[in-house]
Amino acid sequence: MDATDLVKLPFSIFSTDDIDPRDRWAIWQDSISTIFDVAPVAGYDATFAASVHAHLLQTLVFGDTHFTAQTFDRSPLKIARDGLDHFLIQIYLNGGYAGEVGRNKVDVRPGDVCILDLGQTLTTQSTASRTLSLVIPRDTLEATLPGASLLHGSVLRRESGLGMLLGDHLKSLFCRLPTVPQADAVLIQDTVLQMVSACFRPTVASLTQARAPIEAVTQAKIMRYIEDNLAKFTLAPQSISRALGISRTTLYRLFEQIGGVTSYIQRRRVTRAYAALIHPANRLRRIYDIGFDLGFASEGHFSRSVRKAYGFTPSDIRAMSLTSRSLLPYGNGPQGVAKDDYTHWIMLSRQTQIPELRY
């Protein structure tokens, strides 16, 4: 046996079982706040319990989660503050939820597989549930599933062929993760991504056909142009229109439902600024240089924009990142201990998505 076969995937166990019942909710609320703002459902707060048993699979976090009834929320402010740019794929083994995901109503039953874009809004209420949850960075999924952002709130039903196929795959994979060598993580991650993409690809195609196809393609083209040109001070509706040959009227209409094109540019800049500020590779860089490389015209403009989005100045964010607990992706704590390394892994994968800054 090769020595690398003895090194297994990092895992993390979080549980409220051995915590004073009076403190359980607050501890869970703090732990899951990496992804959601949560609130207890009346009548369940006194008996609340939750646990997460998670594995780190290269850049994916895969967890088995139990929890009492509660509400889950990702508001525009929450999205701006946490900077998560991930997808969440879940199969509900029991329980379920209902609510609004983006502008659509959704309900999820036991056996259904759902996908959520954590860069978009949602408000749902769950019953007591057990889920298998897969957290995937946006770039990682979109590399094999272009148009994945269109899937926000999509559900593969338990009785559908693709729903059964993907559900069985996720359940089988999670059962085997404790024995998977770390050396196989890349290969298994690629297999998971291909399976997820294959099962959801028909849904992307149908959603694209349901929209005006040209508008969908045009909006995606504009978003990519914005992403590639964030560092340019001149990036604005006028310059985008000229560069892409699109009328400003069309440009404004395509972005109207997400707050306007100027607001979208600003959100992308502050999101990437947050990631750059907390990334260890940038700790010795001047804060203004980070802002300058993301198209902010002055130090004051950078500071005001970041403070408006996150409630803290760039200096505050850097200082907090230096004093926060370790983000190393290891969590081999004993059963029953409230240990939330899974949140660190998600934060760490967020930090790897930083802009290409000039040095």
Image: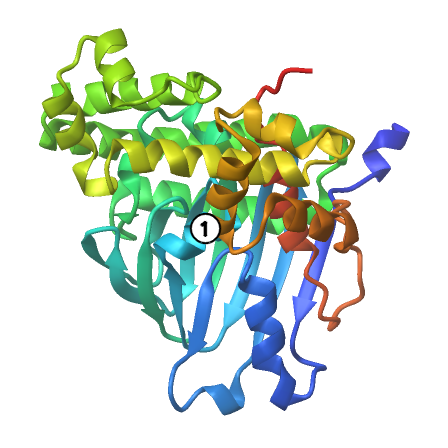
- How was the colour assigned to the protein in this rendering? rainbow
Query: Where does residue 345 sit, x and y in percent of width and height?
Result: 66, 46
- 356 or 11, which is in the foreground? 356
| Residue type at tag 1 | Lys
Q: Quadrant of residue 109?
A: bottom left
Query: Where does residue 56 sit, x and y in percent of width and height?
Result: 66, 44
Position of residue 180 relative to residue 27, above or below, is above
**Is 98 situated left or right of 89 in this image?**
left
Residue at 58 percent of width and 72 percent of height: 28
Query: Where does residue 258 sit, x and y in percent of width and height?
Result: 25, 41
**Is 51 situated left or right of 229 in this image?**
right
Mark 1 lies on residue: 308
- 113 or 285, which is in the foreground? 285
Disc 1 is placed on an element classified as helix
- 344 or 335, which is in the foreground? 344
**Is 31 situated left or right of 41 in this image?**
right
Can residue 59 be seen in this snapshot?
Answer: no
**Is 58 situated left or right of 145 in this image?**
right
Q: How many marks?
A: 1
Position of residue 219 relative to residue 22, above or below, is above
Q: Residues within 10 Å of mark 1 (few under 14, many from 20)?
A: some
Q: Quadrant of the C terminus?
A: top right
Residue at 67 percent of width and 66 percent of height: 14
Query: Where does residue 40 sit, x and y in percent of width and height?
Result: 43, 80
Can residue 95 be seen in this snapshot?
Answer: yes
Q: Quadrant of the N terminus?
A: top right
Residue at 73 percent of width and 28 percent of height: 285
